[in-house]
Image: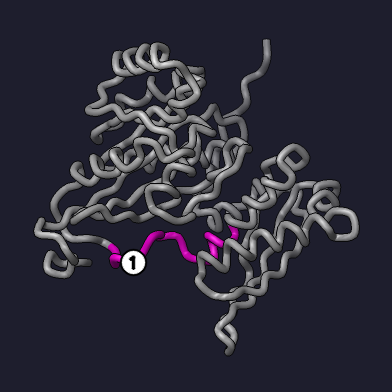
Amino acid sequence: MTTPEEIPNTGAAPRCGFVALIGAPNAGKSTLINILVGAKVSIVSRKVQTTRSLVRGIATEGSAQIIFVDTPGIFAPKRRLDQAMVSSAWGGAGDADVVALLVDARKGIDDEVEAILEKLPLVTARKILVLNKIDTIEPPRLLQLTAELNQRAQFSDTFMISALRGHGVEKLKTALAEMMKKGPWLYPEDQISVAPLRMLAAEITREKIFERLHDELPYQSTVETVLWKDLPDGSARIEQTIYVMREGHKKIVIGEGGRTIKAIGQAARKDIAEAAEQNVHLFLFVKVRENWTEDPERYREMGLEFPHSPKPQSKRK
């Protein structure tokens, strides 16, 4: 922990707390948390339901340390993995000091936001509304949406931002710092993430897979870092396994002549080296594991609880 006298250049008592970002898939939570922290701690993808576990990023603002929890997007769960992700999201909200509902202003109150609003009263923490992508709609519609959302839930504050462009983000960060409770910091000043580097490295590679194969590969693929060995020259040898559900998916990831997996590896290696602050030698392997979404060990690797009784899918009438 950090004591008051250890906080540099501030005359104020230290503050510290947790802020959970919740919202529908693709609301922009991962983009926002990376900007607030000032580094990549959560992967970003056009593919929905990219974030699977509670990714914690740490930011400092004045005398405050803010621990951001980027939760998986909340949606109607159909499979066991879906259920684990949604449970993780609501669990993160329940443990936070402040819950920020991030809404895509362009989409407005769709079915997914509607479902979140219905459950939001169960969250006892302070709730704030963050309207994202405000540059994509006209001001009158934005004001109307703001009024509608504030009628639906008791938000203490409303913020309008564009996470992608950085508009309004500093104002949001300053306000969140003031909401944190007085108390010692939980992490060193230079720490930006709670997630181990092994896990972050696996998430980075998964991001690069999605970037390259967005329309070709189902999101039921996962990456695990099986080896991280620091070498005498200061670099690291990293071996990762990409698990896919079908033999056909394996061929897609590898690509003709291995070109696809080579490109994925090159892109991932660059970001992993930046995050680890050392040169890395990345080796990727692809394995077919048809029922990996039924394997509790895979859930533990992702930081999720394994739902032993998945909700049955409703039968169509």
In the displayed structure, 248 sits above or below 100; it is: below
Seen as rendered, the residue at the extreme right is: 257
Q: Quadrant of residue 3?
A: bottom left
Q: Position of residue 69 (x, y in %)?
A: 38, 47
- Observer-nearest residue: 232 or 137? 137
Residue 35 painted magenta: no
Q: Characterize the magenta stretch by its predominant secondary structure.
A: loop
Callout 1 amino acid: Asp
Is residue 95 at all visible to an observer of this figure? Answer: no
Q: Position of residue 182 (x, y in %)?
A: 13, 52
Q: Position of residue 112 (x, y in %)?
A: 50, 23
Seen as rendered, the residue at the extreme bottom is: 232
Q: Quadrant of the C terminus?
A: top right
- Observer-nearest residue: 231 or 166? 166
* Left or right, 162 with reference to 266: left
Q: Residue at x 78, y 40 (%)?
A: 216
Q: Residue at x 30, y 20 (%)?
A: 153
**Coloration mode:** one colour
Q: Quadrant of residue 39?
A: bottom left
In the displayed structure, 169 sits above or below 159; it is: below
Q: Residue at x 48, y 36 (%)?
A: 28
- Observer-nearest residue: 91 or 281? 281
Task: Specify start and end residues of the magenta stretch as a single range.
Answer: 187-202
The residue tagged 1 is 190
Q: Quadrant of residue 231?
A: bottom right
Q: Residue at x 79, y 52 (%)?
A: 253
* Left or right, 25 with reference to 119: right
Is residue 248 at all visible to an observer of this figure? Answer: yes
| Disc 1: CA contacts within 10 A as few (<14), some (14-19) or many (>=20) | few
Element type at mark 1: loop
Count of residue discs: 1
Q: Quadrant of the N terminus?
A: bottom left
